[in-house]
Amino acid sequence: MKPLYPKILIWIVLSLFVQPGCGQIVEKQAVKNTIDGNKEQIISGNFSSQTTQVFDSLEVDRFFVEYPNLKEYEKDVRSFYQGRKFAYAWFEKSLLIEPAHNLSNRILNLENDGIYRKLFYKETLDSLMHGTSVTSKTVKPDVMLEILLTAEYFVYSKMAWDGMSKEVSKSSKWFLPRKAINYNTYLDSLLKSPSKGELIKEPVYRQYELLRGYLGKYRKLDSGNSWNPLVSRKVFSLGDSSAFIRQVKSRLFLLGDFAGDTSDQTFDQPLADALIVFQQRHGLKAEGKLGKETLTAINVPLKSRIRQIMVNMERSRWLPVQLAGDYVAVNIPEFKLHVYNGEKLLWSCNAVVGQTVHPTSLFYGEIKYVVFSPYWNIPPGILKNEIIPGMKKSSSYLTKHNMEITGYRGGLPVVRQKPGPSNALGLVKFLFPNSYNIYLHDTPSKSLFNETSRAFSHGCIRIAEPAKFAEFLLKDAEGWDSDKITQAMHAGTERYVTLSNKVPVFISYFTAFIDRDNRMNFRTDIYGLDERLAAMIVADEEGGRK
């Protein structure tokens, strides 16, 4: 099997502009989906497929003279219209079709996509769109509006679907490959009606649209509610009564976790259940108690949550749209490993990731080897900082830790730990060759998986269910059933097994995401990467996208 990345399966994209099951194009009065809600005479239905109304190719030249700030998109625009033989795409019978209004609505409301950039010619677009409200069928289409809509499509698509530049993602320590989209091909496909039953979606990772929905909800919350900190020195539990409890119920009601009586001030079971849901959504210990950590999370300002959602929408723009087959994703702030087949989540398990001082790198790899009963070759940094000082303190240090010297390099011993239950890598490791020297592995320190915050390693990723993961990777390998895997893990002799089909693994960083129950989740920014990216998003308002 060849690597799945970057051969991303991107489906036909029409959801911005076309709803599934639209009928034939008919002339009627329709309601424009804009802030002011004005009624306009438009054509409802799919994109225009007409070929009789055309314009002179010189109009493209004239357009970019009048709109020079869109010059960088000239090649895309010209190529698109050459493919259509300069037939109008946004007009039918001289009237704007409905998708034109849907597109302009998204363009004119970029903040709904978490984009701060000031759009060139925004006021002009708005004015031209309003100017078509009483267009007669006998009047020719507005060629400048036609080309402006197409040019602004390319502006919008590259901002909303591709995101900020590769320089920005790299400076955010994001070393996963960025997806590649042919926007001209997408725009061309937008003009074609979807086949019956065809799935319609945008060319962005599915989390993007989910986060976009919650961005709107949190902005609405922020505009209509004060979010003053709730303060109490007491730790409350079931049966307690206080006006403070009523405040907590009201706050959790607004956040969607509590559905009971917000006027009641008793700490009852519905509140305890609501706290458990809130704690699960925030990666806290789900115990239904109102402690300091939970209260701190409840008090996070809505504006901070909005920025957090925007940052993770930007990260979602960088990921592959969709993958087929098996693949693995590790979300560092969530401390979780997820196993997928296509869009289906097969299972998840807890993970231990790198400490703040030894962060796990964010990158893409392909698992190639399962190594049973592994040796642990001590990295130079750990050797200098931990092993050699230990050897100086005790002559039996190596024996006590089941280690041995295999040679010398640069005046220092080369040390490895022998296979066995005390080995730092546990009983099995999973290798995906990379320049960061990071891999997945078992661990003898099982208790760490019970912690809510699990950043304890030197950079590699420890997983809570290594035997199950080995079974998943070797499910198609002849002779590797669960008994054989258990035997190999405890054999005490290192054994490499090469996978016939390499499995993609994405090591990513999402501090805001929507879970499978459609709940908004937040996690702590353990590596401090959110604020830097948030600052670049806000700065983009003045500086423009690179």
Image (cartoon, rainbow, N blue to C red):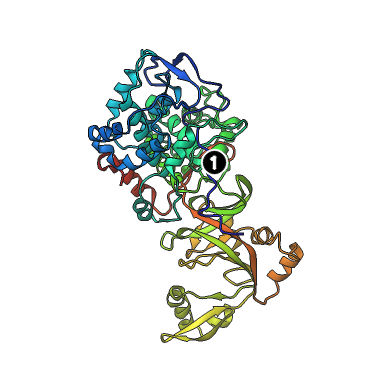
Residue at numbered disc 1 = 11
Q: Is residue 355 above or below residue 535?
A: below
How far across and how far down the image is residue 509, in percent?
46, 51
Q: Is residue 217 above or below residue 449?
A: above
Mark 1 crowd level (few <14, some 14–19, many ≥20, 10 Å Cα) = some
Q: Is residue 508 left or right of residue 35?
A: right
- In depth, the one of 159 and 527 nearer the eye is 159
Examine the image and state in which quarter residue 308 appears. Answer: top left
Residue at 38%, 21% (x, y): give it.
35
**How many marks do you count on the picture?**
1
- In depth, the one of 260 and 234 nearer the eye is 260
How far across and how far down the image is residue 405, in percent?
53, 85
Residue at 50%, 59% (x, y): give it.
353
What kind of residue is marked 1?
Trp
Examine the image and state in which quarter residue 86 appears. Answer: top left
Task: State which quarter of the image contains the N terminus.
Answer: bottom right
- In depth, the one of 189 and 362 nearer the eye is 189
How far across and how far down the image is residue 200, in percent?
55, 34
Report whether residue 71 is seen: yes
SS assignment at label 1: loop
- In depth, the one of 342 and 471 nearer the eye is 342
Q: Is residue 523 above or below residue 504?
A: above
How far across and how far down the image is residue 444, in percent?
61, 66
Residue at 30%, 42% (x, y): give it.
72
Q: Is residue 461 above or below residue 544?
A: below
Report whether residue 443 is seen: no
